[in-house]
């Protein structure tokens, strides 16, 4: 059995994670790791001993948030309206990913790289979202030709819009996306659309 990390090593790891969260929030997921180490008061070598790659650090920082998004998708499976559940999850994803510049791209990149430390947690979240899509399609509320890959790309795009253009524009795009996903006979009436974004 390996020895427990020394107290100073544990403190260094905790400090690095706390600082990394701040730096990623400020500068995005492409922020300088040297800046993270400097602000944490350790050398870059110490950072790499704890987190050998950027994705390893990102995974540690994002793990809870990605798990919460996975859990939100699993909970939404029980919704009475599969399409509304899917749109609601897309809204939540865009809100949370838009808070950190570069996050949607990091998640999409990890989905295509099974050697990335971010791959497992990103995949678990997206598989749960794929179940929302499948359920909405089986209920006849979403077009059957929409693929999970297209849904994930749309999720990333919404995060990008929220990040660079703000929530109001993201809500507008989400409403248009909701119409695009729906089967023609499931679209809201003109008066319904005028009432506000699809929920």
Image: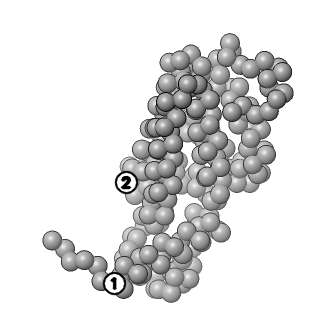
- Residue at 41% in and 76% down: 13
* Residue at the image position 51 percent from the left and 42 percent from the top: 72
Relative to residue 81, is residue 173 drawn left or right? right
Image quadrant where residue 155 sits: top right
Name the quarter where the C terminus is drawn.
Answer: top right
**How many other residues sit within 10 Å of disc 1, few (<14), some (14-19) or many (≥20)?**
few
Q: Nearer the viewer, residue 125 or 156?
A: 125
Q: CA distance from mark 2 to mark 1?
A: 30 Å
Packing grade of label 2 (10 A; few <14, some 14-19, many >=20) is few
Q: Looking at the rendered structure, which numbered label has been put on residue 115? A: 2
* Image vertical order of residue 62 relative to residue 178, above or below: below
Q: Residue furthest left?
A: 1
Of 17 and 68, nearer the camera is: 68
Local secondary structure at mark 1: helix
- What x and y, as percent, mark residue 52? 39, 70
Label 1 sits on residue: 7
Residue 125 vertical position relative to residue 196 in the rendered view, above or below? below
Q: Is residue 63 visible?
A: yes
Residue 124 at x, y percent in the picture: 42, 44
Say which of 143 and 114 sits in front: 143
Query: Quick one: 166 or 76, which is closer to the camera?
Result: 76
Q: State left or right for residue 121 relative to residue 165.
A: left
């Amino acid at each position: 059995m390996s020895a427990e990390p020394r107290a100073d090593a544990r403190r260094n790891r905790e400090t690095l994670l706390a600082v990394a969260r701040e730096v990623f929030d400020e500068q995005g997921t492409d922020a300088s790791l040297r800046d993270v180490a400097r602000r944490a008061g350790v050398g870059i070598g110490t950072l790499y001993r704890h987190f050998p790659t950027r994705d390893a650090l990102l995974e540690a920082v994002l793990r809870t948030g990605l798990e919460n998004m996975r859990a939100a998708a699993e909970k939404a499976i029980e919704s009475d309206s599969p399409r509304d559940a899917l749109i609601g999850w897309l809204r939540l994803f865009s809100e949370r990913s838009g808070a950190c510049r570069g996050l949607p791209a990091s998640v999409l990149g990890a989905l295509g790289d099974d050697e990335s430390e971010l791959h497992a947690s990103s995949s678990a979240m997206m598989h749960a979202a794929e179940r929302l899509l499948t359920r909405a399609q089986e209920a006849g509320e979403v077009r059957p030709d929409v693929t999970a890959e297209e849904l994930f790309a749309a999720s990333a795009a919404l995060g990008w819009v929220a990040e660079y253009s703000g929530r109001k524009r993201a809500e507008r795009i989400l409403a248009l996306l909701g119409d695009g996903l729906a089967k023609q006979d499931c679209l809201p009436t003109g008066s319904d659309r005028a009432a506000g974004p699809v929920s």
